[in-house]
Image (spheres, coloured by chain):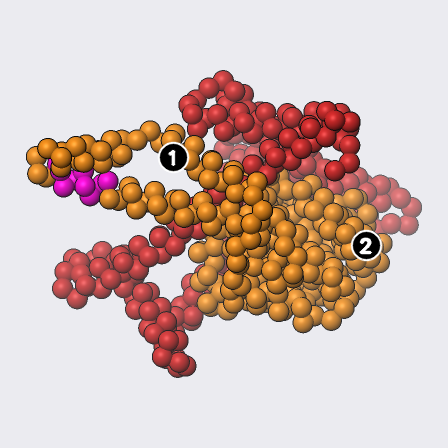
Chain colours: A red, B orange
Amino acid sequence: MENPGIGIVLWYTLAAYLTLSIFSFLYKDNPFYRLAEHLIVGISAGYWIAILYHTSLKDLWLQPLAANFMALFAPGGSPLLEIGLIMTSIVPGLLGIMMFSRFFSTISWLSRWPIAFYLAITAGVALPLYLQSFTIRQMQACMIGLAGSPWEIFGDVIIIAGTICGLAYFYFSLEHKGVIGGLAKFGIWILMIGFGSTFGYTVMSRISLLIGRFDFLIEWYEIVINYAKS
Amino acid sequence: MAGNVEMGFWDKLMAIDRRWIYLTIGIVVFIPILLDMTLPVYVTAEVKAVYDRIDALPQGTVVMIPCEYDPATMAELRPMAHALFRHCFAKDLKIVSCALQIEGVTLVKDDLALIAAEYGKTYGVDYVYFGYKPFPAIVILNMGENFRKPFPRDYYGTELDSLPMMKGVVNYSSCALLVNINATSGADYWINYANGRYKAPLALGVTAVSATDYYTFLASGQIFGLMGGLKGAAEYEKLINHNAAATKAMNVQSIAHSVIVVFILIGNIAYFASRKRKKAI
């Protein structure tokens, strides 16, 4: 490893200190953990504002608006077209400003307009696609022709039975007795197997994050040692 | 009397301070990191499907690899992204990428540049990074029409049309496939809009926590491949014959999981033993 500069050493040391501060919560709540937690919240908020300003407000709103205003007063342009383009920036901008009316009780009703606009877009764009992608396609996937090797057929039967029984468990208009009760009970087993596999994956995920932090601490140690030796 | 002493032991075990468990897990994870060992990694069909589709693409083909991970999830998804980038660059494929998770914007930029440098690839010629725009649903929908609608300029502020690689690259139909690496349920947006609306061939690389949620989409054919957590990354590393962070971490995982299984077994035995004792009393 090449010799790191003092800047690298300091930043890595600060990050290592914050990592250990967060880990200290495993022992018990303490001021080091609290400081690290508050830093995350504060820095995240500042980072978000900076990124959103540069990638959205400036890039998608301020710059096009300024360019269209310039074009409006430029010779040989098409005023109607430019006014139309300006409005496509001004209307969303006004809707955005109206969201801030929530801070003032007398005019807070104004914020309902952009919310209504947002809901209408979501309903129009998302709902038909969600129905298609998350319901119809999943139903189609359960309509399986039982074919192939015995093992494949067994898998298909499990998918069909698991789906029907899982849905039976969530059918509450009939008491879970008799046939419905039996189906629901099998449905619970299927759900439990699903939760078990999710739990296994969750353990893997959490251990992965711990490995990531330990790797970082080892890297920090090597950087500090290299710097001290140089 | 002897039985009572034994039951007392199980009761104590049930009431053990959880910090001892944390400490044990910490030690069990930390020590294997320092050791040099290699445990086998088996490749699953869903990861092989991603590899095979990419491997079959001819030189110069454009692929899209949107990456949505942040510092909290990079331990899992960064090795996956690195493995994918390595495979694509080794095959001389061209990569288009973006980051629709705000905390990961600079991470993805650095990762892409790092692997590109390994293979001597040039920005704008071999790969392009769009950066970030808010509200992924709208951005993904807009990209389906034209990448230039949500991203008139790339991350570095260069107009997309002035980048040599972007000539003729319009939207998803210009890309042979999409592999979305996603730390959140934002992968739903890619399924719903990129695949559902624009029929883009899509594969996912997700955190292990959310992997089970996406197997249903694999079964329904809405995604053609799935990589789950570090295991998925390690499998991909094995396929490209480049053992890196994920493969090393899987060794640690195997040992840590074994200890956790032992804990679960002991916990269950202690639970039933102490319950039996309470009933007897």
Pinpoint residue A14: horizontal percent, then vertical percent: 64, 25
Task: Decide: is A191 above or below B22.
Answer: below
Task: Decide: is A126 above or below A155.
Answer: above
Task: Kindly identify the residue that appears in the image at 54 percent across and 27 percent down.
Answer: A20
Instruction: Count up the numbered dots.
Output: 2
Judge whether residue B190 is colored magenta: no
Report which quarter residue B167 is drawn in: bottom right
Of the two numbered discs 1 and 2 on the same chain, state the one appearing first in sequence: 1
Q: Label 2 marks which chain's residue?
A: B
Of the 4 image quadrants, the one containing the C terminus of chain A is top right
Q: Is residue A103 left or right of residue B278?
A: right
Is residue B25 visible from the viewing direction of this image?
A: yes
Magenta span:
B270-278
Label 2 element class: loop
Q: Is residue B94 left or right of residue B196?
A: right
Pinpoint residue A163: horizontal percent, then vertical percent: 33, 65
Pinpoint residue A29: horizontal percent, then vertical percent: 43, 22
Q: Nearer the viewer, residue A171 or B3?
A: B3
Label 2: how many Cα within 10 Å (few below 14, some 14–19, many 20+): few
Task: Kindly identify the residue that appears in the image at 47 percent across and 36 percent down.
Answer: B27
Judge whether residue B273 is colored magenta: yes
Q: Is residue B60 left or right of residue A152?
A: right
Residue to which mark 1 is pinned: B21
The circle drawn on residue B120 is 2
